Amino acid sequence: MAVLFRLVIAWALFGCGRLMAGPSINRYGISITRFGALPNSNEDATPAVRQALAFIRKHPVKRLSFPAGRYDFYPAYASEKYVFSSNNDEGLKRIVFLQRF
């Protein structure tokens, strides 16, 4: 019985601790509003989405939800990358969400 009690305490302290840090996660995922993006606000949502993607890389999140509305992505925080697309002009392109490995 004492071993079971210790396992439950250890799980509560260490197993859940990773999930309690930062924005809360539930079984449905996490909302982009937890990172500061608000629908219909006319503010640049790029920094919030980048923060959310960085958070998702480190935590077991299965879904990132965007509440209904309009989200704006301006070029100020966009990544730049030289790309060549077969059906497009080659050159320096601004990309909102550039995946980095």
Image (cartoon, helix red, strand yellow):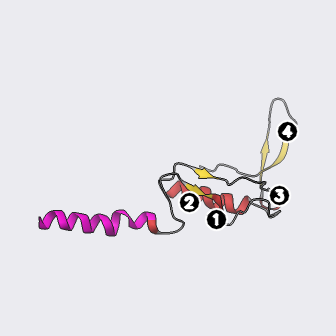
Q: Residue at x 82, y 47 (%)?
A: 93
Contact between marks 1 and 2 (CB within 8 A): the answer is yes
Q: Mark 4 points at which residue?
A: 90
On the picture, is 32 further left or further right than 20? Answer: right
Real-space Cα separation, disc 1 to disc 2, in angstroms: 10 Å
- Name the mark nearer the viewer: 1 or 4: 1
Q: Mark 1 points at which residue?
A: 35
* Helix, strand or loop at mark 4: loop
Q: Earlier in the sequence, mark 3 or mark 4?
A: 3
Contact between marks 1 and 4 (CB within 8 A): the answer is no
- Name the mark nearer the viewer: 4 or 2: 2
Real-space Cα separation, disc 1 to disc 3, in angstroms: 17 Å
Q: Name the residue under label 2.
A: 55
Residue sitting at the far front: 68
Q: Main secondary structure of the magenta part?
A: helix
Part of the protein shown in magenta: 1-19
Q: Name the residue under label 3.
A: 74
